[in-house]
Amino acid sequence: MTVGSPTTDNLTAAQANKGLRYTCLQTILTRGDETPGFPDRPCPAGIMAIHHFPACWDGVHLDSPDHQSHMYSTTRGAFLEAGPCPASHPVRVPQLAYETMWQTQVFEDLWPADGSQPFVWSYDDRRGYGTHADYVFGWKGDSLQRAMNDSCMFHACGSPGRPGILQTQTVEEMNRCSVPNTVTEDTEGWLSVLPGQKMEM
């Protein structure tokens, strides 16, 4: 399943998807104060992109042509429990969220004096509205069933240094994980423009 779309290019559409947000990290543990676009100021501990996936399934299709229609989002954002599922998508599934933390504090010198946003997604999104994510099932053994049976939420399911039904990794362990490059790209020289659709400013 997927959430969001790189073609989202306006604030109204970005606000409509409560599951896609950014947090200007004051510390590595900052949660809340979410925005639908990139933060508009330097962030002391970096920027976190948050992707909440839908928690309601139609109970029939394992996928759909757009990789979204077989699911339905009742996400309330801000790490709240999702709302009740509608009759069209009656099967509740575990809530899944990605948190990606970007160490933007090392680029504080890039912030323009006029306060404009210095960061840009690689598909030429300068506001952050087009953030999106994919999820492919990847649970090991019976870990998903154990988590569902336990009905734990967030850190109660397991965190480094805290007991829980799931075994988790530290950030350092996660960062040591790597995947061999399988895509050949022309990476020589400079690009005159970023690939992707042109965004209206």
Image (cartoon, rainbow, N blue to C red):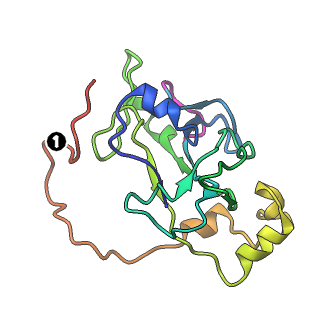
Q: Which residue, as the protein is rendered here, is positioned at the far bottom? A: 141
Residue at 72% in and 69% down:
168
Quadrant of the drawing holding the C terminus: top left
The stretch of residues the image draws in magenta is 40-47
When asked about the image quadrant of residue 76, the answer is: top right
Q: Nearer the viewer, residue 164 or 132?
A: 132
Residue at 79% in and 57% down:
155
The spot of residue 187 in percent (x, y) is 19, 61
In this orientation, does residue 9 appear? Answer: yes
In the displayed structure, 91 sits above or below 101; it is: below
Q: Nearer the viewer, residue 71 or 58?
A: 58
Q: Which residue, as the protein is rendered here, is positioned at the far front? A: 87
Q: Nearer the viewer, residue 37 or 169?
A: 37
The spot of residue 1 in percent (x, y) is 49, 61
Residue at 71% in and 73% down:
144
Q: Amino acid at mark 1?
A: Val
In this orientation, does residue 37 appear? Answer: no
Q: Is residue 181 left or right of residue 11?
A: left
Q: Which residue is mark 1?
A: 193
The spot of residue 96 in percent (x, y) is 64, 57
Q: Which residue, as the protein is rendered here, is positioned at the far top? A: 114
Q: Is residue 175 left or right of residue 131?
A: right
- Sort mark 1 into few (<14), some (14-19) or many (20+) by Cα contacts within 10 Å: few
